Amino acid sequence: GDLHTWTQADVKQRHNPPAYTASLDAAMTLVPECRQLSMETYDHNGIYPAHVRASAWVQGAERCFAANPAIALVAAALRAKEATNEQ
């Protein structure tokens, strides 16, 4: 099937989850409301490993580094949500 489509075995229904790791718009839906955020992209300049191309920070969590901006934002948003749940 489609790379972004999955089917539950016991239910005859297809699900098309948002492309969180490929779309900044989809990743933004995971950011808790009223949170500040920042994002940066990088060229490989020897400061970060070659696979690190972006970072994101969402208020309440540590900055996350990843291969693309969407993945960095997803990680930061989920960490911020988890930190909120721990309080």
Image (cartoon, rainbow, N blue to C red):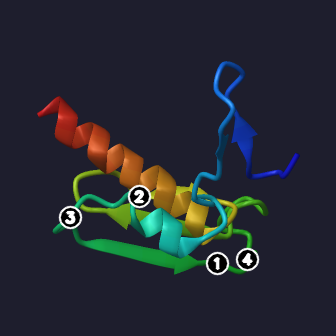
Find numbered disc 2 in the image and state the secondary structure of the residue it sits on. loop
Q: Secondary structure at mark 4?
A: loop
**Tag 4 and tag 1, C-beta contact below 8 Å:** yes
Quadrant location, the C terminus:
top left
Q: Is residue 13 above or below residue 9?
A: below
In this view, the mark in front (3 or 1): 3
Which residue is at a point 21% across and 66% down the rendered structure image? 35
Mark 1 secondary-structure assignment: loop
Which residue has dot 1 on it?
A: 42
Tell me where residue 68 appears, x and y as whole percent: 66, 67
Read off the residue under disc 3. Answer: 33
The reply to whether the C-beta atoms of the residues labelled 2 and 1 are less than 8 Å apart is no
CB-based contact (under 8 Å), mark 2 and mark 3: no
* First along the sequence among labels 2 and 4: 4
Distance CA(mark 3)–CA(mark 1): 27 Å
Snapshot quadrant of residue 13: top right
Residue type at tag 3: Glu
Q: Is 41 located above or below residue 73 in the figure?
A: below
How far apart are the two marked residues, 4 and 1, measured between alpha carbons? 8 Å
Locate residue 70, reporting x and y percent.
57, 66
Q: CA distance from mark 2 to mark 4?
A: 19 Å
The N terminus appears in which quarter of the rendering?
Answer: top right
Horizontal and vertical percent position of residue 24: 54, 73
Question: Mark 1 or mark 2, which is nearer the start of the sequence?
Answer: 1
Determine which residue is flagged by label 2.
63
Q: Amino acid at mark 1?
A: Tyr
Where residue 61 appears, as percent x and y from the top left, is: 30, 51
Q: Earlier in the sequence, mark 3 or mark 1?
A: 3
Alpha carbon of mark 3 to alpha carbon of mark 4: how far? Answer: 34 Å
Which amino acid type is shown beneath numbered disc 4?
A: Asn
Q: Which residue is mark 4?
A: 45
Depth-wise, is mark 2 or mark 4 nearer the camera?
2
